[in-house]
Image (tube, rainbow, N blue to C red):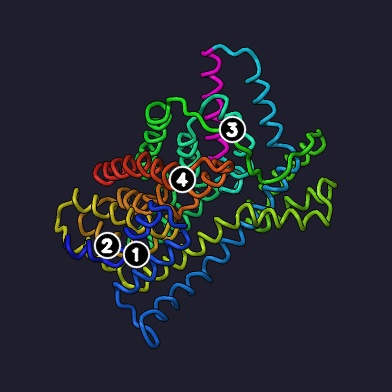
Amino acid sequence: MFLEFLLNPVVLAVVLLLILSALRLNVVFALIVSSLFGGFVAGLPGRENLLPGTMEAFSKGLASGAQLAFNYAMLGAFSIAISRSGVTELLAQQLFKKLNRNLTPAKLLAFKYVLLVILALASISSQNLIPVHIAFIPVLIPPLLGVFQKIRLDRRMVACILTFGLITPYMVMPFGFGRIYLNEILIKNINQFGLNVTADMAPKAMFIPAIGMITGVLIAVFFSYRKPRDYKELPVMAADTAVEIKPIKVITGFVAIAVALAGQIFMDSLIVAALAGIAVFVISGVITLRGTQDVFTKGVYLMGGIGIVMIAASGFAEVMKFTGGVDTLVKLTADGIGDRRGLAVFIMLFIGLVITMGIGSSFSTVPLIAAIYVPLCVKLGISPLATVAIVGVAGALGDAGSPVSESVLGPTAGLNADGQHDHIYDSTIPTFIHFNIPLLIFGWIAGMIL
């Protein structure tokens, strides 16, 4: 079983992806190379030879990721529009005013933690209250890098806080993206494969794993990255040019956010929500009709890189499905553990971690594993509540710490605005350590006691 696991094409492809990323090869190139390698190991049949078969699967996956990339482009345009209202500039300005006062060490410490709480709340709100997902980060964070510099804040801590806020809400709160993950993906797939569970069970099942996420972020803030860290004073590549702060523009910004939120709630479409928000800026005169050209172009520049990575990740995921390696991994779990519940729960969670590390999306992992995990849990006598926790955590594991996850790419996009925050060593590895390890532990506990 162990040798089969090590030689599995998905495992080998994911390991190669992580190695190439750690060697600082561009993530998109690493995804393409790892896809070709995974297809080669699996011996995918092609029309004439191996390469066309692998690339055919990769291209098919690219098409499925196009909608996600377009969503990001629209959210990027909306974020640029928000930046032109002066909302983020106003926040940075007020924070600088606080810092320019004669602060005692105690007040400076309090300022630091209040700022961290604000960042955590902003990240959490991006998943439900103002569902712009990661698009707020490249707009909100660059203006604050000067503030971080003054208080000597370690950006790895900020990366952990932002990733915590991007992942934990959808794990446990059935609103916004959480409604999609918990109700439309997790509960739906579990019911589809023979177990009768209800939507109200998901938050209860995921509560203990969420404690693991909280534990991880507290360790990052109060232990791992609490010491001051200095950065060079370099120019920031901001998402947009500085704007003059005027009350009417700021008010328009808040109205646009409210309209976009309503569009998301009632139309259930990020594209419509972003378009409605931009329309508010046009109607108010903050942005002219001609100015929308520039807004969209800069929005694509802002979020396009992440969109391309997610498209490539979709291609990688399709190749991995095509190899049959995912099915083999899941079946290895069922065939090799017997009636040992503790081992079964651990292996199910660990395989979920491996799959999500490669795919980069917990939302895509659950449908791949539920077909085997649910019957296996029934066979082992695991309760429905524990089954929800196991499948839900197996999907969420790897979302933090994957080089191709938007929950890691987003923080990098903001924190690296001056070129001093490395995607792998300052975002990927810190979030992997502080979230995947606690989530694996607390997910196992949930699977054993619920």
Location of residue 374 in the rendering, given as x and y in whole percent from the top left corner: 30, 60
**Residue 433 is drawn in which quadrant?**
top left
Number of the label disc, if any, that sits on residue 267: none
Q: Is residue 115 magenta?
A: yes
Q: Is residue 122 left or right of residue 324?
A: right
Please name whichever residue, 167 or 193, is drawn nearer the observer in this view of the structure.
Answer: 167
Q: Is residue 22 magenta?
A: no
Q: Above or below — where is 439 with respect to 354?
A: above
- Pointer 3: residues within 10 angstroms few (<14), some, or many (20+)? few
Amino acid type of disc 1? Phe
Tag 2 or tag 1, which sits nearer the N-term?
1
- Pointer 4: residues within 10 angstroms few (<14), some, or many (20+)? many
Location of residue 339 in the rendering, given as x and y in whole percent from the top left corner: 14, 55
Tag 3 or tag 1, which sits nearer the N-term?
1
Tag 4 or tag 3, which sits nearer the N-term?
4
Tag 4 or tag 1, which sits nearer the N-term?
4
Q: Are marks 1 and 2 in contact (CB under 8 Å)?
A: yes
Q: Main secondary structure of the magenta part?
A: helix
Amino acid type of disc 4? Ile
Location of residue 167 in the rendering, given as x and y in whole percent from the top left corner: 46, 45
> Which of label 3 and label 4 is nearer to you?
3
Which residue, given by chain and number where applicable, does mark 4 sit on?
A: 167
> Which of label 1 and label 3 is nearer to you?
3
Number of the label disc, if any, that sits on residue 233: 3
> Which of label 2 and label 3 is nearer to you?
3
Instruction: State the extent of the magenta-drawn residues as a range.
Output: 105-123
The residue positioned 32% from the left and 39% from the top of the image is 438
- Pointer 1: residues within 10 angstroms few (<14), some, or many (20+)? some
Please name whichever residue, 259 or 70, is drawn nearer the observer in this view of the structure.
Answer: 70
